[in-house]
Amino acid sequence: MGLPVSLNAPVKSRKEMISLLQINNVSKTFGGLKAVNDVSMEMRPQEIIGLIGPNGAGKTTLTNLICGFHSVDQGHIILNDQDITNKGADFTSKQGLTRTFQVEKSFKDLTALDNIIIGVLMHEQNVNVAKEKAEAIANKFDLYKQKTVLARNLTIQSRKLLEFARAYATNPKVIILDEVMAGLTSKEIDEQLELIQEIASEGTAFLVIEHIMHVIMSISQRIIVLQEGKKIAEGTPQDISSDPVVIEAYLGKGDEA
């Protein structure tokens, strides 16, 4: 007779079981509109979570609340056992939570390397050490040959990589990626996915917002679905793709968020 299923299941490491980021019953209202309504979720180290929902579902507002760009009306946000609720974006970033933006926000008149150095200087005060670390990151993100190019002169793919590299350079525990695949070719998307998985294996958790459904389905361990500011579903890609509520609200409408 075989062992009970619960004993046959893989044993999770202590690191995998630790809750790194907790979003507890968070709400935000703008005027009379409840943009985020009592949303809760948690993330663990190395975890890749997809965040999807129709336009206006509250994805951007939720990420702005998590990162400290907007104040929370109700609820709490806990990062690594520290309450970061309404502490502001600068404080949140220094605690190890960073993001990219739909419209990349690189310093366009600085070189690619200088953009990365700015990220490193968030946690490394020695400029020479920061430059060494930035060069290693440029190499990791396939930007080394373009390190002296001004950000404004980079290709779309390279600008998106630079946005991602600068976020990674801050030595984060959690990275929120906001549509980093938009405008990329299939080959470039595959390269981005490999990079995300490599960095996640080092311990960083990812919250990925993306319009391209097959990307979310292929990379996410769990997916959270928002509609009209509420979390309507959470589960594995298989769970989400077969959930009738999600199909009605989102997936059935095609490949657009």
Image: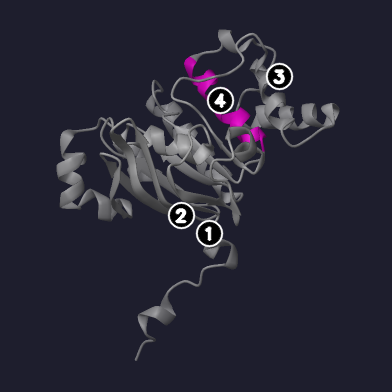
Q: Compare residues 25 and 114 and report the one nearer the observer.
A: 25
By secondary structure, the bulk of the magenta-drawn segment is best described as helix
Residue indicated by mark 1: 19
Q: Amino acid at mark 2?
A: Glu
Question: Which of the marked residues, 3 or 4, is nearer the chain's N terminus?
Answer: 3
In this rendering, which labeled residue sits more in front, label 4 or label 2? 2
Question: Which of the marked residues, 1 or 2, is nearer the chain's N terminus?
Answer: 1
Badge 1, how many Cα within 10 Å: few under 14, some, many 20+? some
Q: Amino acid at mark 1?
A: Ser
Residue indicated by mark 4: 163
In this rendering, which labeled residue sits more in front, label 2 or label 3? 2
Q: Residue at x 66, y 27 (%)?
A: 138
Residue indicated by mark 3: 114
Question: Which of the marked residues, 4 or 2, is nearer the chain's N terminus?
Answer: 2
Q: Amino acid at mark 3?
A: Asp
Residue indicated by mark 2: 42
Q: Going by the image, does 169 lie left or right of 129?
A: left
In this rendering, which labeled residue sits more in front, label 4 or label 1? 1
Residue 31 vertical placement versus 207 (above, below): above
Residue 180 vertical placement versus 149 (above, below): below
- Residue 191 drawn at (x, y percent): 48, 32
Cα–Cα gap, marks 3 and 1: 34 Å
Disc 2 + disc 3, Cβ < 8 Å: no
Where the C terminus falls, by quadrant?
top left
Q: Going by the image, does 38 lie left or right of 198?
A: left
- Residue 88 drawn at (x, y percent): 58, 35
Badge 2, how many Cα within 10 Å: few under 14, some, many 20+? some
Where the N terminus falls, by quadrant?
bottom left
Residue 111 vertical placement versus 116 (above, below): above
